[in-house]
Amino acid sequence: MRVRHSQKNHFSCYNISMFVETYIIRQLAAFADFGTLTRVGEELGITQPTISRAMQKLEAELGVTLFDRTKNRITLNENGLFAAEYAKKIMALQDEMISKTQERAGLHKSFAVGSVAIMPAVCAVDSAKKIYGGIQARYEINDNESHLIRGLTDDVYQMIILLHPFDDSLFASQKYFSEKLSVMLPKNHPLAGRKSIALKELAGETFAVYNEVGFWEKVKREKIPNAKFIKFLPHEDADPITAITQASDMPSFISDRTTAFTLPENRVAVPLSDKEMSVTFYAVFKKENAGLWQELLEEMKRKE
């Protein structure tokens, strides 16, 4: 004779006959911490009668008396103290579940990247925001490598961008992407017809440049004799460099990684031949945090 097992028996670990609702468990844990219905009500924003009914319901569910009651006071008895310890554990696990799940989805992660150049920093932050919805992400530009490594060591940054690999017992690195700079010149400029230009050939020019571009600025200042640089802050609504290059003959620079900028009709972009104007960036991070940023690192690999 075949014995049929009911679905209820098959899933008996889920279909338990008694279920204590979370709000009741939270109130019991709060009572153990605060000791009176008044304090619990103040902390949780509910009335004393509501708490009393919840505790009576819990006792009925458990079939055990949890409180000693007098005319003017209610206290936990030994059974109540025992149950309250479990209530605290349950609430702690629930809070951990919520926090860890949200963290995995990026809701509570924060991401700060320190970089020797502006473009890889902006791209890394944009990728982090795209992958981890709600993340707080920022970047800082600094061409002092020692400063960046110290910041990564001290968790000021979760990642740094350098011009070379950096791997040891604490850190790991991976190639990010390469970038090349060209100079934007008016079409009537004497060098506009060239296939490439060395920085020293731009001596004496006045350039419109973005503020905080990293190591590029130092290289340009050192290799372009008597050059002047007028700095502008990037702006989402109206890019100042776009306006300047459309309305004047002032040279500027453009990256081959730039996608939001359209070369004005009155301009040509001539590649710069100096080796410093063609570089490869590397993302550096703590080995212990590689798993935390795995999705971001995989996205960054695709930008090579």
Image: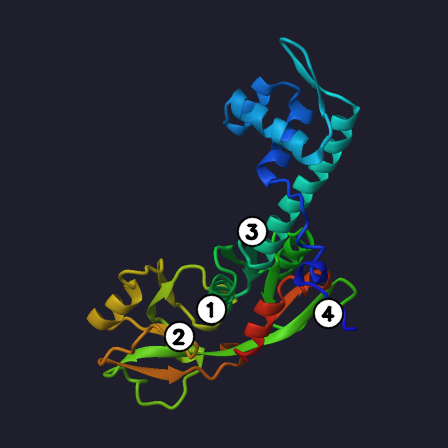
Residue type at mark 4 is Asp
Residue lying farthest to the front in this orientation: 1
Q: How is the image coloured?
A: rainbow
* Element carrying mark 3: loop
Q: Quadrant of residue 72?
A: top right
Which disc, if any, is residue 119?
1
Q: Earlier in the sequence, mark 1 or mark 4?
A: 1
Q: Earlier in the sequence, mark 1 or mark 3?
A: 3
Marks 3/2: CA distance?
30 Å
* Residue hosting label 4: 167
Image position of 248 (left or right of 183): left
Residue at the location (64% across, 74% down)? Answer: 174
Q: Earlier in the sequence, mark 3 or mark 2?
A: 3
Which disc, if any, is residue 258?
2
Residue type at mark 2 is Thr
In the rendered image, residue 37, in percent from the top left (x then y), is placed at 59, 20
Marks 1 and 2 close (CB-CB < 8 Å): yes
Which disc, if any, is residue 108?
3
Residue at the location (38% across, 63% down)? Answer: 210
Badge nearest the viewer, 3 or 4:
3
Badge nearest the viewer, 3 or 2:
3
Marks 1/3: CA distance?
25 Å
Marks 4/2: CA distance?
29 Å
Which disc, if any, is residue 51?
none
